[in-house]
Amino acid sequence: MGNLGSESLYDYQKNLTSHSGSINNIENKVIQFTTSIEEDNIKNEDIRISINTNRYVSYYFWKGVLDRVLAVLGLIITLPIFLLVAILIKFSSRGPILFKQERIGINSKSFKIYKFRTMLTNAPNVPTNSMKNDKNYVTKIGSILRKLSIDEMPQLINILKGEMSFIGPRPMIKDHQYLIKMRQLKGIDILKPGISGLAQINGRDEITDREKFKYDQQYLEDFNIKTDIKVLIKTVSKVLRKEDISI
């Protein structure tokens, strides 16, 4: 990656719209990294990051525009599916149509992620892969929605709100402290979270948190529209083959 110019990312923050999200001063981030490392005795292998400011701002501006345009089109095209799924969920089990969960997003700020509810209302608020008997909590309709990845569709709303992108590191729940901490240390949290990302097309819950972090770091080092398109194509391919790729 290129080096920062005379101006930091902070100098661009006031001039940016919500297309690019909020951006921290990169110098402050480096200080935060160093402090955290000293406190937790974590070895500093390559903690300093340098990002070409113009590249970052340009990328997130145009990506934000594309995200919103595609999200609007997606909502219009899938409106009949939204209505049908909403009816099926409402009449198949008690509870709300949408499931809302607090996730950690850009700049480590929390936000509410939206999904179609696929579980009973008494299900534990933890990742399904950490449950011993998660199938006991998944509804019949929910099982179908998950297999087709339709449960993720409401995240188009998160994209319209500027909280998420189609492609990016998957937003973590607060219980995933290792990934959250490492993303902060390496500056990965300056990236807007996505519906799908490198980790999701390369194993999802079959890989460890350390492996997920490596994919996050790889994305930070090479974020561009071309990479996003490749990930999007692979995501669609896996969905069509009914491979579960979401978190």
Image: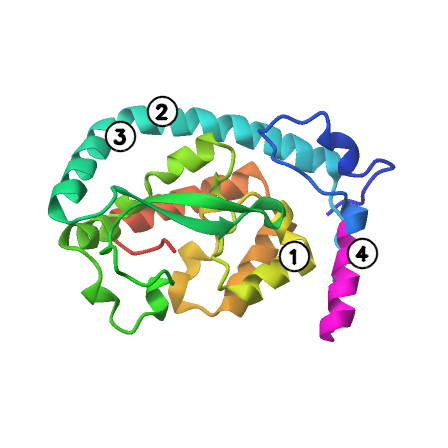
Question: Mark 3 is on which residue type?
Answer: Thr
- In the image, which disc is placed on residue 78? 3
- In the image, which disc is placed on residue 184? 1
Inter-mark Cα distance, 1 to 2: 33 Å
> What's the residue at 79%, 49% (across, down)?
28
| Residue stretch in magenta | 29-46
Residue 147 part of the magenta segment: no
User: Position of 73 compared to 43: left or right?
Assistant: left
**Nearer the observer, disc 3 or disc 1?**
1
Please tell me which of labels 4 and 1 falls first in the chain. 4
Inter-mark Cα distance, 4 to 1: 11 Å
| Image position, residue 179 (x, y; %) | 55, 63
**Nearer the observer, disc 1 or disc 2?**
1
Local secondary structure at mark 3: loop
Residue contact at pointers 3 and 2, CB within 8 angstroms: no
Question: Mark 1 is on which residue type?
Answer: Gln
Can the viewer see residue 42? no
Please tell me which of labels 1 and 2 falls first in the chain. 2
